[in-house]
Image: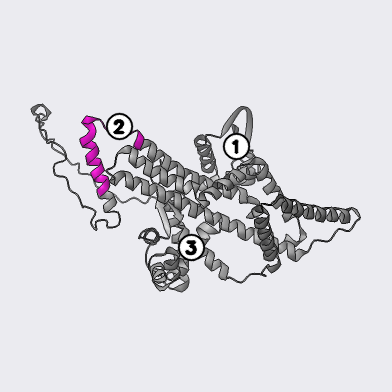
Amino acid sequence: MDYSTLAHLRKHDTTWRLLTSPHAPLIISFLFAVFIKPNERSLPFDQASTQLDDYLFHLNDQYGADTFPKSARQYLDDWANGASPYLRKYYVQGRDIPQLDLTPGAEKAVEWLQGLQPRQFVGTESRLMTLYRLLQEIVQEAEQDPALKIAELEKQKAELERQIARIRSGLVEAADPTRIKERWFEAEDTARKLLADFRQVEYNFRTLDQDVRELIATSEKRKGELLDEIFEQQDYIRDSEQGRSFHAFWEFLMSPQRQHALESMTTAALQQEALREVDDRHFLPRIGFFLLEAGEKVFRTNAQLAEQLRKYLADQAWLEDKRILQLIRGIERTAVAMRNAPPDSRQFAVIDQPRLALDLVMERSLFQPKIKTVLAEVRLEEADACVDVQALYNQHWVDEARLRGNIRRLLHEHPQVSLQEVLQYAPLQQGLAELVAYLNLASKDVKALVDEAVEDVLPLGEAGRTVRLPRILFTR
């Protein structure tokens, strides 16, 4: 923590730059409301722009029209650009709308500010017990003397037998509400920090993927030497302490028995009287689903690295293609060099005559005499017609993200739900258009099923109107 290190962090660290930004209240409050609070791993650019537009309108109306003069899209582009961006802007294969996600530095800033808020109480006893338990586990695992290990286990066994004997005699201690609430808050805080760690792990894998792409584009080494260097970097991340910890965590989470046990424990904990008035009762019961969603993004990022290596291995440089490959490599090297200093003007490259101008004799059209236009002398009279233009303003848009969220929430509680159950949980608000949107989601979902043997009657929500359709099932 010397002066030079802190001065460098002050200038380049994303977390520090965000906290000292003049627009930090706007940026952090919006990122918390859109990403952290609902636990969204990523959002489409247009959806984030719409939400920020509403938020800016509310702030300008409250604090003055010129408080935030830029448009929502301009603010999002500013936050996603630069050497240390607060948002990561990227494209998903098959989509032309960019996605936005928090960077690890921005999430650290939000987490640090959350720690400044006053809490209901600080669980000192719970943290002390956690500290004691962790130190005890370290000592037990590091101990190499079998006699000492057996003595410690015998001591724990005797303590358990004394507790069993007390319970059998009828001496059951009443649960301390304060202690239960302490441990609940500590578990919730640990779960939120665990979700935040996933963005850092994903960022590390994505950095490796970017380094590999640049290495392939700029290196003049032979293919074997280059692959050795790439695999060494990949093995370093996988065999690092963070990589081993992540893979061990993922194996633990992928066990169905442990997922069921985690869900059962959170459900049983919420039945306690001490937790009846806890503010957020929905976060921990769904932590397994949140962790699986975050871990899936990490594995998709790692799969991109494997796909890049596969394409590189499949790149056969035949004699007649060498000149083309050299030109492509030159373009890639130029693009990497210009990444941090892009041209100011969009027209930074101009190609003269992109195609040959061919003018064949047979392509010329035959002569056609001009048609003389004759205008009729008709006297126009002003009409008094009343046209109802209200239909032009009755257009509405169905939000498929909201419908997909309804299906996902039910699938978290049940392995399979029908469209009829989804509509019972969230009735149609936009009639037939919303029903058609559900059918469109089912057609795109490879896990959706259609049972032709059973017919469901679905309400349209319009004066008791219904529609009959074969049963549509959504599965996990």
Q: Which residue is mark 2?
A: 316
- SS for dot 1: strand
Residue 377, above or below 56: above
Q: Amino acid at mark 1?
A: Thr
Q: Residue at 51% of width from left, 57% of height from top?
A: 35
Classify residue 298 as left or right of residue 325: right
* Residue 123 picture quarter: bottom right
Q: Amino acid at mark 3?
A: Phe
Q: Is residue 324 magenta?
A: yes
Q: Which residue is mark 3?
A: 30
Residue range (magenta):
312-333
Q: Which residue is mark 1?
A: 475
Q: Amino acid at mark 2?
A: Gln
Q: Residue at 82% of width from left, 54% of height from top?
A: 158
- SS for dot 2: loop
Name the mark on residue 372.
none
Classify residue 155 as left or right of residue 114: right
Image quadrant occupied by the C terminus: top right
